[in-house]
Amino acid sequence: MNNKPYNIFVIISFVIVYALLSCGKQAVSEGIKISGHQIVVNGKPYVIKGICYHPVPKGSDTRSFENLTQDLALMVEAGINTIRVYEPIDDLTVLDEIKAAGIKVIIGFGYNQKGNYDIYSGTFIDYVNKYKDHEAILMWELGNEYNYHPEWFEGDIKNWYSALSKATELIHENDTSHPVTTAHGELPDSLALSSCPNIDVWGMNVYRWDDPKEIFTEWKALSSKPMYLSEAGGDSYMTIAKDGYAEGLNEKVQADADRKILESVFAHQEVCSGVTLFSFTDGWWKAGNNESQDIGGWAPNSTGVPYDGTPNEEYWGIVDIERNKKAAFNIVKAKYNQSSGQN
C-alpha cells in the first residue's frame, strides 16, 4: 500500500519524460521539407530573409570570421534569418555561433576548389556527412551561376549540368534532411531543368533593375518547385549620374533599389521563398588594390544593376568594411522585421 503513490508518481514521470523526448525527436526528424513552392522548417513555411556573406578583411583576399560576433549581432538587428556562403564553413565553433544567433546557413560548394570540399573531387560529400546533423544548416548549394561559364566545362554547359545532377543525387543518398539547391544565373532554361530534375530548390542570381516581379510569374509557369533569389540588390556607387541620382558614392541609390526589390520579393511569397541579398559587407578585394576601395569590377549578365547598369563590385555591402551601417541596412532591417514567415 505504501508503495502505490510512489509507483504512480514514477509511471506519471515516465510518461511525461517519454512524451517530451518523443516531441523532441519528432521536431528533429521533421527537418527541412519541400511542399509545393514552399520550403518548410519544423512544419512551418520558411521565408528566407537572407544575406550573402563572404567576409574578407581589408588588405586580404581570403575570407575570415574574425568579426563574426559583431556581424551576427548586426544581422540579428536587421532581422536576417539566413546567410548564404560561397564556400563551406569547416569550423564547428563558427557554425555553433551562427546557430546560437538563430540564423541558418546555405552552404555553397564550388566545382573545382583544388580538392577542398569541391564537386570535381567528390570531397563535398565528406563535408555533407560531417555536418549534416548541424542545426544551422538550411540547404546545400551546388555552384554559383556556372551557366555563364561553359568554358569551365570543356565548352559544353551540359557537362556542368551532368555533374550537378550527379552531385545532387549523391547528397540525397547521404542526407534526407536538407534540400539541395543551385545558384543559377537568371531563370533556368529547359536544358537546365530537364538535365537536373532532382534539384529541390532553384536559387537564381537575378539583376533586373529594381523589380524582379516578372521572374516569379515566369517560374510559376515553368515549375511547381520552390525558388529563391540567391542574389539580388544594388551597389552604392553611381558610375554616371542617372535617374536623378548623383554620380559617385551614393547610399541612397542602393537603399532605394533594395527597398523596391525586397517589396517585390515579399509580395510574391506564393512562389518565391525569399532572398539572400547581395551582400553583407563591402569587398575591397574584388576590383583592385586590397588596401583600398576601388571603382570597377565586372560580373557576367549584370547590366541590370540599378541605376547605372554598372556593378561596382566593391560597393555592395549593406555595411561598409568597418561595419558602419549604410542606408541600405535600415531598409533591410525595416523590410525583414515586418515580413511574414519564420524568424
Image: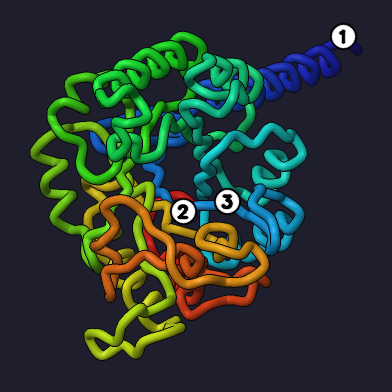
Q: Quadrant of residue 156?
A: top left
Q: Is residue 138 visible?
A: yes
Quarter of the image with the N terminus in it: top right
Q: Residue at x 73, y 35 (%)?
A: 91
Q: Give residue 1's mark.
A: 1
Q: Considering only vertical position in the picture, is 311 above or below 171? A: below
**Residue farthest left in this picture:** 221
Q: Considering only vertical position in the picture, is 312 above or below 28? A: below
Q: Report the mark closest to the observer, 3 or 1.
A: 3
Q: Position of residue 115 (x, y in %)?
A: 60, 21
Badge 3 element: loop
Q: Give residue 30's mark.
A: none
Q: Residue at x 64, y 36 (%)?
A: 89
Q: Position of residue 306 (x, y in %)?
A: 28, 71
* Marked residue nearer the N-terminal end (1 or 2): 1
Q: CA distance from mark 1 to mark 2?
A: 62 Å
Q: Position of residue 340 (x, y in %)?
A: 37, 57
Which amino acid, by three-letter code, is at mark 3? His
Determine which residue is flagged by label 2: 50
Residue 34 horizontal side relative to residue 271, left or right:
right
* Marked residue nearer the N-terminal end (3 or 1): 1
Badge 1 element: loop
Mark 2 crowdedness (10 Å alpha carbons): few <14, some 14-19, many ≥20: many
Residue 189 horizontal side relative to residue 79, left or right:
left
Q: Report the mark closest to the observer, 3 or 2.
A: 3
Badge 2 element: strand
Q: CA distance from mark 3 to mark 1?
A: 68 Å
Mark 3 crowdedness (10 Å alpha carbons): few <14, some 14-19, many ≥20: many
Which amino acid, by three-letter code, is at mark 2? Gly
Q: CA distance from mark 3 to mark 2?
A: 13 Å
Q: Residue at x 25, y 62 (%)?
A: 303
